[in-house]
């Protein structure tokens, strides 16, 4: 499913049948956002070009300015889409009924899955460059700190976190490490080595923080490599990686 | 010592006395770079304004364009200055003759010291946004990976790294975590909580990777909090942090 289909599927179906003009407007907006996500995923904010977004979206200039007043407003709308994806993937991960550390690993897997799509890549780049928008201070870092703080607090209650590990410090470290893996991998390999970095980091994080009994079972299942699966395939590491492919 | 003085002090003193015109040119260039570092430390690349740099530097527009052809060329010159600072601080830390893990901690302290100056803050922001320049791919991340890989390899030889810890993976994690701490702290607190994040992350990293005998001695000395000292003072955490102060 493309990011565009995803965006469209969130629209209540009834509206589209009843009001064709609104349906067309939504389709146009979706086409612009899809094109914008591809542009912002492959370029920094200042390099991204409104005329390339226009060209990619195949809408008219008038239509683009009907929906968005500026490059910044398009960027913020892409971050809105990323916001929805993040909340959805956390809900899905929590719904699996796994223990807290396995849930944290699953969230990480879902983020990697989402990063193969341009909305998540664009949103992460934009957020890293400070484009979360004034209505969303600290996005997505504060959000991820809450998610991991809740999971690691639950892990402590489940007695699978080592007693010396503070769930709050550890959640900050998980977020710093994840945000840094994206930035560093973008800088050194156009995200081609992101899967491997994330895998190694989580092996180290969990090796450090989980109780030995939990680690034994986890390693028997194949550890983080088994969770990340397709993100560790060799072909992703070759060439210039995802960002250059869009 | 201000960043400007620092930049000026690297100029061979003889040149200035002998050729006054060159001395004036160097002073002008230094004033532009100091102003640019302050601008890029406080704003993302795209928000940074050439006219504010001009205003801050108190040089003429003609003088600015004599030295630099564009905003991008000024940004790259700021990253050049950061590059020098990084190499200097690593040399200084290595010269202390500490064991490899204490040297890694000292490098981290020196980076925090440097980040109180606008050149390092500006360089780190610019690098994070992809402004290292084509002649310096992956800067500064590849550089830090080499520095920490060498230190952790030496730590393994010194038998102070736990046998299960791979020095290469661990160096990547240290760099991811450090790069992420900067990005996240910038996003959530304008760098006000950076010292605390770095301290907690290194306590966790070293707690995970060092042998127990080393950790005992380290903790007796006060651990990472003793190394980071002034960066953990409460007043830094108040208000909007360093970036807003420039």
Image (tube, coloured by chain):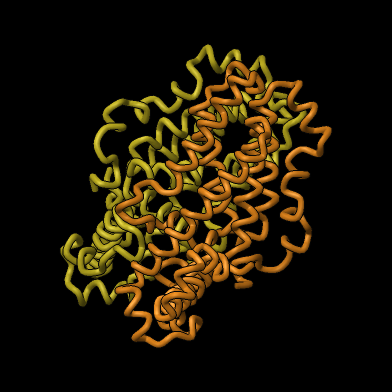
Chain colours: A yellow, B orange
Q: Residue furthest front?
A: B18
Residue A128 is situated, as x and y percent measured from the top left of the image, at 46, 56
Q: Is residue B185 left or right of residue B54?
A: right
Quadrant of residue B6 within the rendered picture: bottom right
Residue shown at the point (40%, 33%) measured from the top left? A195
Q: Position of residue A18 (x, y in %)?
A: 27, 64
Depth order, front residue of A77/B211: B211
Q: How many marks?
A: 0
Give percent across and percent down for residue A131: 45, 63
Quadrant of the snapshot with the N terminus of chain A: top left
Residue at 38% from the left image edge and 55% from the top image edge: B132
Residue B207 can be seen, yes or no: yes
Left or right: B222 with respect to B31? right
- A11 or A79: nearer the eye? A79
Is residue B155 positioned above or below B9 on the image? above
- Residue A229 sits in quarter: top left
Q: Residue at x 53, y 12 (%)?
A: A220
Indicate whether B29 appears above or below B175. Answer: below
- Let me know if residue B32 appears in the view: no
Tell me residue B214's x, y (percent). Answer: 74, 25
Q: Is residue B172 above or below residue B225?
A: above
At 34% from the left and 66% from the top, the residue drawn is: A46
Between B8 and A73, the one lying in front of the other is B8
């Amino acid at each position: 499913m493309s990011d565009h289909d995803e965006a469209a599927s969130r629209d209540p179906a009834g509206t589209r049948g009843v009001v064709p003009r609104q349906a067309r407007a939504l389709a146009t907006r979706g086409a612009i956002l899809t094109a914008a996500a591809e542009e912002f995923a492959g370029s920094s904010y200042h390099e991204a070009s409104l005329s390339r977004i226009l060209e990619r979206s195949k809408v008219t200039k008038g239509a683009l300015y009907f929906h968005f007043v500026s490059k910044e407003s398009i960027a913020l709308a892409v971050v809105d889409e990323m916001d929805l994806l993040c909340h959805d993937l956390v809900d899905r991960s929590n719904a699996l009924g796994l223990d807290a550390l396995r849930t944290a690993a699953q969230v990480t897997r879902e983020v990697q899955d989402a990063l193969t799509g341009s909305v998540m890549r664009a949103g992460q780049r934009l957020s890293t460059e400070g484009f979360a928008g004034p209505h969303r201070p600290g996005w997505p870092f504060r959000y991820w700190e809450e998610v991991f703080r809740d999971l690691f607090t639950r892990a402590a209650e489940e007695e699978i976190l080592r007693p010396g590990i503070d769930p709050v410090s550890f959640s900050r470290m998980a977020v710093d490490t994840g945000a840094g893996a994206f930035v560093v991998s973008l800088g050194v390999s156009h995200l081609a080595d992101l899967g491997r970095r994330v895998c190694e980091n989580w092996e180290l994080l969990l090796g450090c923080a989980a109780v030995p009994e939990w680690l034994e079972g986890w390693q028997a299942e194949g550890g983080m490599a088994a969770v990340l699966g397709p993100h560790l395939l060799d072909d992703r590491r070759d060439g210039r990686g995802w960002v250059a492919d869009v």
